[in-house]
Amino acid sequence: MARLAAVGWTLPDSQPGDDGPALWARLSEAAFNGVLPRRAGNEPQLAFWLLLARGCPDLSLVDDGQQPVSRWPADELPVAAEILETLGLQPPDWRRVLAASGDGEVWFF
């Protein structure tokens, strides 16, 4: 929830103090499997399930072809790289970070 809030996203009908079991029950509708369309407006829920699946090995996400999903569906739902980085769904673009520090210093590594 904190990661979603950091990018200004909220989950439907969520409250700031919602705990894990309450969120799970509301978003999964207490089912052990379900479908979430990859469409505009569903970004917070998609991010929630991706983050949850990364932290919980017993939860698996699959696409329409039953292939495992572990990355943001950028082709279908473009989102700014900075948002995905803040969410923890994409590693930082170090070229951008280094360019932003362009104060004339030389970097050796």
Image (tube, helix red, strand yellow):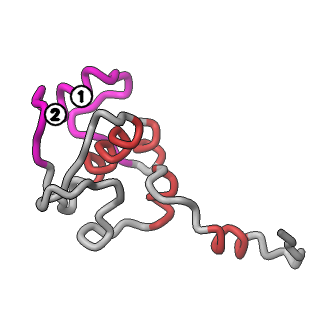
Q: Tell me what residue is drawn at x 67 percent, y 67 percent.
A: 97
User: Residue visible at 10% across and 30% down?
Assistant: 31
- For label 1, the SS is helix
Q: Which residue is mark 2?
A: 28
Q: Mark 1 belongs to which amino acid?
A: Trp
Q: Quadrant of the C terminus?
A: bottom right
Indicate the position of residue 72 as horizontal and vertical percent values: 34, 60
Q: Is residue 104 above or below residue 44?
A: below
Quadrant housing residue 4: top left
Q: Nearer the viewer, residue 40 or 57?
A: 57
Query: In the rendered structure, which amino acid carries the disc numbered 2?
Result: Ser
Residue 18 part of the magenta-drawn span: yes
Residue segment shown in magenta = 9-35
Q: State which quarter of the image contains the N terminus.
A: top left
Horizontal side, residue 11 vs residue 39: left or right: right
The residues bearing labels 2 and 1 have C-alpha atoms spaced at a distance of 6 Å
Mark 2: give few (<14), some (14-19) or many (20+) Cα within 10 Å: some
Q: Position of residue 50 (x, y in %)?
A: 33, 47
Q: Do the CB atoms of the residues marked 2 and 1 lie less than 8 Å apart?
A: yes
35 or 70: nearer the viewer: 70
Helix, strand or loop at label 2? It is: helix
Magenta: main secondary structure equals loop
Residue denoted by label 1: 24
